[in-house]
Image: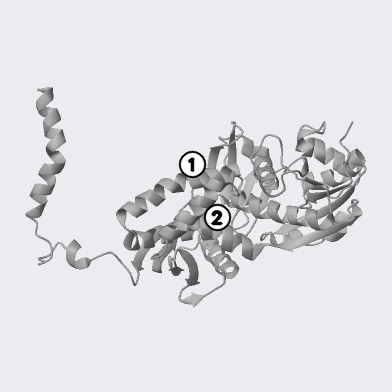
Amino acid sequence: MAEKIKKVVLAYSGGLDTSVMLHWLKERYGCEVVCYCADVGQGEELTGLDEKARASGASKLYVEDLRQEFVSDYVWAAVKANAVYEGVYLLGTSLARPVIAKRQIEIARREGADAVAHGATGKGNDQVRFELTYYALEPDIKVVAPWREWEYKGRSDLIAYAEQHNIPVTATHAKPYSTDRNLMHVSYEGGILEDPWAEPPGDIFQMTKAPEDARAEAEYVVVGFERGVPVSVNGERMGAVALLEELNRVGGAHGVGRVDLVENRFVGMKSRGVYETPGVTILQAAHRALESITMDREVLRMRDALSLKFAESVYYGFWFAPETELMRRTIDATQEDVTGEVRVKLYRGNVIVAGRRAPRSLYNERLATFEADTVYNQRDAEGFIKLNALRLRSLAQANK
């Protein structure tokens, strides 16, 4: 028998999975369903959601604008960390899940709900990200994960269910892609993309032009940072949301930020994902270039050692874990002097650093010059090299 639930808050997007779940939850549990949609930058996907949710049986729909919080508290934290999962994935979906789940718990408290539900499958990472956040913030909350309970095996079954119950959805048998869009990126999974040899169809991309179709002229963009946080584009100060939107626009026009990878999910399987992340691709390149002249070598290396662990923790869903909070504070401390500007050149999918400057730059042209100088005594290098070679020479002598 189904566990007794009086009221559940469903993370609702209006897509295939959650549209079916809304109807299924009412049938399965006989409970009130409150729908909740987080606006993290989906744009037109939010249009008509209230009417759609109520028509499918929801008692109400919350649409919460989380764009500012998402970019300022989550995306910028990843930029400061230079967080990249398995070398290429910039964590667009991973970063959105904790901010979405956090507000879902807040709404559940407000509504007096005894349960929350999400549309993540039992095979994926999102179930972990949602539920680790739920339990970290509300340890005794009941969690309903329909994909782990119902008899349906895949999206084709859900399409048939939606047709049977007259639930309006946009997915079709011919094009059953799963997409996730927010201010940072768009991800694509499923359908033909499950074949790792198949090239992604050109018509699926929403944020970027194909590099070969981008304009033939390069464009220069200057990004300003304060303490590692992006604050301006081409000298114009912008709020977090507007700045990311602008870089998405200009980067997308040049085909910047497309990624196709087979990644290792937390649950153990490999999964093929296609992503487009134009704005943050620009920011990652610019931020690292600025750090190169503003951060001490050993501090930079320590931060880089944390970057991998930070990316894994975000990907796995441990945003609200104590170790992730410690890493965020530590990374923030490394960014105190990361203030300045970086000029990048965008050209057909490429982000090329073309210049960097900072008021507290550690770069000393008088030291680095290949011309004559009075600062550095080149003969000092002889003793430095011999001391560093001492153990190598000792080993070589022993080997003889």
Q: Residues within 10 Å of mark 1 (few under 14, many from 20)?
A: some
Residue drawn at the location 67% of the way across and 34% of the way down: 123
Please, which residue is most extreme toward the bottom here? 236
Image location (x, y in percent) of residue 354: 35, 64
| Quarter assignment of residue 41 | bottom right
Task: Determine the residue located farthest toward the top in the rendered image.
Answer: 400
Left or right: residue 299 versus residue 174 is left
Quarter holding the N terminus?
top right
Residue at left offset 85%, top offset 38%: 160
Q: Position of residue 69 (x, y in %)?
A: 63, 63
Q: Residues within 10 Å of mark 2 (few under 14, many from 20)?
A: many
Out of 148 and 114, give the one closest to the viewer. Answer: 114
In the rendered structure, which amino acid carries the disc numbered 1?
Glu
Whichever of callouts 1 and 2 sits on the residue coming sooner in the sequence is 1
Q: Nearer the viewer, residue 214 or 37?
A: 37
Q: Which residue is mark 1?
A: 86
Give the number of the mark in front: 1 or 2. 1
Q: Which residue is mark 2?
A: 277
The image position of residue 378, as x and y in percent, is 9, 56
Q: Name the kind of residue labelled 2 in the image.
A: Thr
Badge 1 marks a residue whose secondary structure is loop
Q: Secondary structure at mark 2?
A: loop
Q: Is residue 333 above or below residue 137?
A: below
Task: Give left or right: position of 86 versus 177.
Answer: left
| Horizontal and vertical percent position of residue 186 | 62, 53
Picture residue at 90% right of the left edge, 44% below the top: 26
